[in-house]
C-alpha cells in the first residue's frame, strides 16, 4: 500500500463544504436506511438489497456488516450505484485492521467518498476522564487522518459506555481537531439521554453527521423495548419536534436492527414517520399504523442463572415440548443457534428439554463480557403446519465478575534499550492466558510522540503460545528488509538514530474478559542494522561444573534459544535438563537432570535459530538483497564439541 504523506489541509476545503441540506430533516430524500445487512431474516444479496431499498424509495444507505458480508462489498457498491443509491456511511472497525483496509481499498477503487462510523467502547478502563479522552484520541486520530486522504469523514458513533455519552463525543471531536471528524447519534442507544435530549442535540449539532431515529419509550432499553418502530414510542413526537427546532438538516437514519424481513421493518418505520409528520405541523393524526413486525411472540430466549450459564428457550407449548423430547431426527442448531456476536457459526454444545424449557449447554463456558446471539427458530418443529413463524433473537452477555484487574505484562523481549534498525520480532509475556483476536488494536509504535503507521504484520491467525500467555509481534518484514517495495513506498519501520516506544494499552483483555492492570511502554533507541549471521564458532563454551554456560556471539531470539539449542551426551542421546536464558538473551545455560558423566559431548544448534533481526546461523536476513554469501551452512544443524573429564 502506498502511504502518501500529503498535508491534511489539502482536503479541508473539500470536507468543509457541506452538501446541500434538506429543507426539512424528515424529507424522503434525506432518509438513510441503516442496520439492514446483518439484521435481515431474508439474508438478501447485495443486488436484492439495493432493489429493495429502491422499491422503498430510499436514495441513501448506511452499510452495516459482519465478516461474511465483506467478500461481497464491491458487489454492494456496484448494486447501489446501479440503483441510484448513495452510500452515505459504512460501519468501520475501531482501527486500521485488515477488514478496515479492505473497506478503504474498495472505496478508493470505486471512487466512493463516504462516512466511516466508529463505535467507541471504554478506551481506558479504570482511568479518569482526561486519560480516557487521550486514549480515544490516540485510537481515532490515525484512522481520521487516513480517511481524510480519501475524502472520507469519520463519525463517532454512540454505542453505550464512555463512547456513548454526548459530552465525551463532543470533547473527542475537539481533541482530534480534524475537519473530517463528527458525530453520529443513535436514539436507540440514548434512552438515558431522553430528559436532556434537546441540550445534548444543541451541543452536538455543529458536529452531527447523521441522526438515527427509533421508537422511544423511557426505560425501553431495560424493558425489552429498546428497538421499536417509529410511532410506537410515546416520546417520538417530542423528539422529532426537538430535532426540527434545532435547525439540524443533515441525514436522518431509519433503522432495521431486528431479525425480521428488513423490508417489512423499514416499511413499519416509514409508516410511523408518515403518521407522525402531520402531527409535527399541528394537524390531526390519521389511524395509527399497526406494525407488521411487532406481532407478540410467545417464546423468550434467555440465560440461566448460576456460575456456568446456559441458554434456554421458555414459553414453549406442551405440544412443542413433547415433540422436542421425542424427536431424534433434527439438527438442534437449526432450532436454537448460539453464536459469538453477529456470527452465524454455532458454538458447540448439547441440547435437552428440561422441565418447560429447551436448554443449550455450551461445551466450553461462555466468556464473561462477550455478546452471544441466540436465535430460536420454531419452524423446524412440525406442530404449526402451513404457517411460517418468526424467529426470536436475543443478544446475551454473561456479566463480568467485579474485581480489580490483576493481569499484567510480565516482560517484553528483546529487553535491550538499544536495538538494531532491522529488529524484526518481539515477544510479549502475560501473567495469565489472554483472549484471542484483536491483539493488534492494543499495541502501537511511537516515534517520539508520533504514531508510526502500519508498522506490524497483522496476521489473521495471531501468534500465541499454546498456553495463551506469550504473544509474538512482528514488524512488517516488507518494511524491514531493504530493497523491497513496501519499504521504498512507506519507509522503514525503524530508523537509525531515532527513539521509539512500543505501547501496550490497558484495554487488552485476558481470557476472562478482564483488562490489564496497567498499560506498558517499552522504549528503545535505534542503532545501525545488524546483517551479521549467527556464528556458533565464536561462542565461548565454559566447561561444565554444575551447569554448562555458553556465551553467545550476540543477543539471540529468546524463545528460539529454548528449543533450537540442546546437548547430546556420550551415548548419542539428547540430554534432559533445564535451560536458562537471561533477559538479555546473550547467554545459554544448561543443567542436565543426571549430572555430567565423563566423556565427549556435543552442543547442537538448529540452523534456523535467529537473532532479533531474523539473521540465522550462517545466513543473514538480507542475504538475497546484498552480495552473495561466500560460505553458507547447508546442514540442518551445526555442532560444537566439548569434553567432560
Image (cartoon, rainbow, N blue to C red):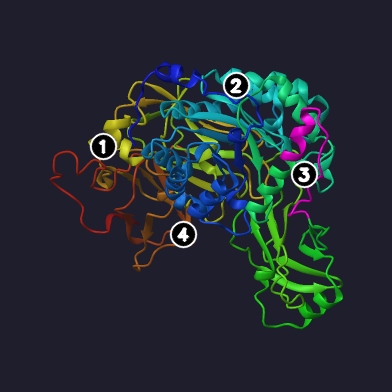
Residue 413 at least partly seen:
yes
Nearest to N terminus: mark 2 or mark 4 = 2
Looking at the image, is mark 1 or mark 4 earlier in the sequence?
A: 1
Q: Nearer the viewer, mark 1 or mark 3?
A: 3
Gap in angstroms between the C-alphas marked 2 and 4: 66 Å
Q: Position of residue 11 (x, y in %)?
A: 42, 20
Judge left or right: residue 612 versus residue 536. Answer: right
Disc 2 to disc 3, how far (Cα)? 27 Å
Q: Which mark is residue 226?
A: 3
Q: According to the image, label 1 marks what residue?
A: 485
| Residue labelled with disc 4 | 595
Q: Main secondary structure of the magenta part?
A: loop
Front label number (2 vs 4): 2
159 vs 323: above or below: above
State the CA–CA distance, disc 1 to disc 3.
Answer: 51 Å
**Residue occupied by mark 2:** 173
Look at the numbered discs 2 and 4 and tell me whether their residues touch, using CB distance below 8 Å. Answer: no
Choose between 544 and 284: the one closer to the eye: 284
Residue 588, percent from left and from top: 41, 46
Amino acid at each position: 500500500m502506498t502511504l502518501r504523506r500529503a498535508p491534511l489541509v489539502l482536503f479541508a476545503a473539500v470536507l468543509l463544504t457541506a452538501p446541500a441540506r434538506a429543507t426539512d430533516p424528515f424529507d424522503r430524500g434525506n432518509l438513510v436506511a441503516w442496520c439492514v445487512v446483518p439484521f435481515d431474516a431474508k439474508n438478501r444479496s447485495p443486488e436484492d438489497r439495493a432493489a429493495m431499498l429502491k422499491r422503498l424509495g430510499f436514495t441513501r444507505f448506511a452499510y452495516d456488516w459482519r465478516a461474511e458480508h465483506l467478500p461481497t462489498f464491491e458487489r454492494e457498491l456496484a448494486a447501489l450505484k446501479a440503483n441510484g443509491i448513495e452510500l452515505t456511511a459504512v460501519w468501520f472497525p475501531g482501527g486500521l485492521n485488515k477488514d478496515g483496509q479492505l473497506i478503504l481499498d474498495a472505496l478508493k477503487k470505486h471512487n466512493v467518498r463516504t462516512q466511516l462510523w466508529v463505535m467507541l467502547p471504554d478506551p481506558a478502563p479504570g482511568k479518569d476522564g482526561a486519560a480516557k479522552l487521550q486514549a480515544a484520541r490516540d485510537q481515532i486520530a490515525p484512522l481520521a487522518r487516513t480517511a481524510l486522504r480519501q475524502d472520507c469523514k469519520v463519525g463517532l458513533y454512540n454505542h453505550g459506555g464512555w463512547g456513548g455519552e454526548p459530552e465525551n463525543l463532543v470533547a473527542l471531536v475537539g481533541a482530534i481537531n480534524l475537519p473530517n471528524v463528527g458525530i453520529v447519534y443513535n436514539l436507540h442507544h440514548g434512552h438515558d439521554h431522553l430528559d436532556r435530549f434537546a441540550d445534548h442535540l444543541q451541543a452536538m449539532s455543529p458536529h452531527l453527521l447523521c441522526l438515527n431515529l427509533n421508537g422511544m419509550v423511557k426505560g425501553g432499553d431495560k424493558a425489552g423495548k429498546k428497538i421499536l418502530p417509529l410511532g410506537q414510542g410515546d416520546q417520538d413526537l417530542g423528539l422529532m419536534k426537538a430535532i426540527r427546532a434545532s435547525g439540524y438538516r443533515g441525514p436522518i437514519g431509519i433503522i432495521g436492527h431486528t431479525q425480521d424481513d428488513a423490508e417489512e421493518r423499514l416499511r413499519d418505520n416509514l409508516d410511523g414517520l408518515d403518521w407522525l409528520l402531520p402531527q409535527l405541523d399541528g394537524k390531526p393524526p390519521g389511524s395509527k399504523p399497526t406494525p407488521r413486525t411487532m406481532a407478540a411472540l410467545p417464546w423468550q430466549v434467555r440465560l440461566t442463572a448460576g456460575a456456568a450459564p446456559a441458554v434456554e428457550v421458555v414459553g414453549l407449548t406442551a405440544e412443542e415440548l413433547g415433540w422436542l423430547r421425542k424427536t431424534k431426527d433434527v439438527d438442534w442448531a437449526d432450532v436454537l443457534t448460539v453464536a459469538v456476536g453477529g456470527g452465524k457459526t454455532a458454538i458447540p454444545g448439547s441440547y435437552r428439554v428440561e422441565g418447560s424449557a429447551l436448554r443449550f449447554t455450551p461445551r466450553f463456558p461462555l466468556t464473561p463480557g462477550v455478546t452471544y446471539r441466540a436465535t430460536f427458530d420454531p419452524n423446524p418443529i412440525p406442530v404449526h403446519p402451513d404457517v411460517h413463524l418468526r424467529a426470536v433473537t436475543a443478544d446475551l452477555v454473561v456479566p463480568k465478575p467485579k474485581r480489580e484487574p490483576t493481569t499484567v505484562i510480565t516482560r517484553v523481549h528483546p529487553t535491550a534499550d538499544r536495538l538494531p534498525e532491522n529488529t524484526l520480532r518481539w515477544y510479549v509475556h502475560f501473567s495469565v492466558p489472554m483472549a484471542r483476536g484483536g491483539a493488534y488494536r492494543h499495541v502501537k509504535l511511537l516515534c517520539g510522540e508520533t504514531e508510526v503507521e502500519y508498522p506490524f504484520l497483522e496476521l489473521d491467525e495471531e501468534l500465541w503460545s499454546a498456553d495463551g500467555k506469550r504473544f509474538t509481534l512482528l514488524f512488517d518484514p516488507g518494511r524491514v528488509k531493504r530493497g523491497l517495495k513496501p519499504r521504498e513506498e512507506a519507509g522503514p519501520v525503524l530508523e537509525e538514530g531515532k527513539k521509539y516506544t512500543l505501547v501496550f494499552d490497558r484495554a487488552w483483555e485476558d481470557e476472562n474478559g478482564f483488562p490489564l492492570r496497567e498499560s506498558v511502554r517499552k522504549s528503545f533507541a535505534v542503532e545501525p542494522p545488524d546483517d551479521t549471521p549467527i556464528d556458533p564458532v565464536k561462542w565461548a563454551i565454559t566447561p561444565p561444573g554444575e551447569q554448562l554456560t555458553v556465551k553467545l556471539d550476540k543477543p539471540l531470539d529468546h524463545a528460539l534459544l529454548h528449543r533450537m539449542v540442546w546437548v547430546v551426551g556420550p551415548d548419542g542421546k539428547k540430554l534432559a535438563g533445564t535451560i536458562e536464558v537471561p533477559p538479555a538473551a546473550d547467554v545459554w545455560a544448561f543443567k542436565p537432570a543426571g549430572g555430567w558423566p565423563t566423556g565427549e559431548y556435543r552442543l547442537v544448534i538448529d540452523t534456523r535459530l535467529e537473532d532479533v533481526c531474523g539473521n540465522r546461523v550462517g545466513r543473514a536476513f538480507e542475504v538475497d538483497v546484498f552480495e552473495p554469501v561466500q560460505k553458507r551452512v547447508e546442514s540442518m544443524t551445526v555442532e560444537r564439541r566439548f569434553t567432560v573429564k
